[in-house]
Amino acid sequence: DQQVKQNSPSLSVQEGRISILNCDYTNSMFDYFLWYKKYPAEGPTFLISISSIKDKNEDGRFTVFLNKSAKHLSLHIVPSQPGDSAVYFCAARFSGTYKYIFGTGTRLKVLA
Amino acid sequence: GAVVSQHPSRVICKSGTSVKIECRSLDFQATTMFWYRQFPKKSLMLMATSNEGSKATYEQGVEKDKFLINHASLTLSTLTVTSAHPEDSSFYICSARVASGGGGDTQYFGPGTRLTVL
């Protein structure tokens, strides 16, 4: 049972435009969320986080939005750059633990 | 800051041998580290939580006698794949937990180890 889902396996965006990556979860006991970027044969790189008590967090070109009622979060990248091309994973933490469950990933391709 | 290294980056071994993978936090201390496994085109699957000075906590379905974890210091955790078989071939990634403000935390990942068992 996949508790954290990224329903779009891939996404292509033109350079300079906005990239929106989506993540849905089913467990209301998740209290903290992370987004990672991953290149092949490398470990994930942390991008941005958000607590369940917030609905938005921004860091440079990256903004994460959380809609608790819909159990949905999204990562916005603007403007998108070719170097952003990678696989993006969302991860959700069980409240009271340090354990994160990762989504299945979305491959983003930013076209020059 | 928050750099995590893993060694080796790639290992090929014969079936039946044991392989040790090291995970180090280079510029910080980590009381909690994690070991993940990633299959091709799949998500990261948490195998176990490694706690400094105590026994690791394994996820359901992960054999603790097969995947031995030792977290001997605040900067080093090791994963030993014992009596490796071809089905153990995978990409193994470790992470170290760093607490952030407001009750949150972040995991910083190592670069991963590609294990191939012949």
Image (tube, helix red, strand yellow):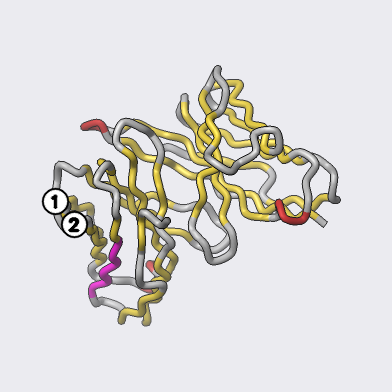
Residue marked by disc 1: A55
Q: Main secondary structure of the magenta part?
A: strand
Which residue type carries mark 2? Phe
Is residue B103 found inside the magenta-colored segment of the image?
no
Foreground residue among B51 and A85: B51
Q: CA distance from mark 1 to mark 2?
A: 6 Å
Q: Is residue B78 left or right of residue A13?
A: right
Q: Chain under label 1?
A: A
Residue A69 placement (x, y as % from top left): 14, 54
Residue B95 placement (x, y as % from top left): 49, 40
Answer whether labels 1 and 2 touch (C-beta < 8 Å).
yes
Quarter of the image for the N terminus of chain B: give it: top left
* Disc number for residue A65: 2
Tell me if residue B5 comes above or below residue B70 in the rendering: below
Tell me if residue A104 comes above or below residue A28 in the rendering: below
Residue A77 placement (x, y as % from top left): 26, 65
Residue at figure coordinates x 40%, y 68% from the top left: A106
Residue range corresponding to the magenta coloring: A18-23
Q: Is residue A74 left or right of residue A99?
A: left
Residue at figure coordinates x 64%, y 34% from the top left: B64
Which residue type carries mark 1? Asp
Residue at figure coordinates x 70%, y 33% from the top left: B65
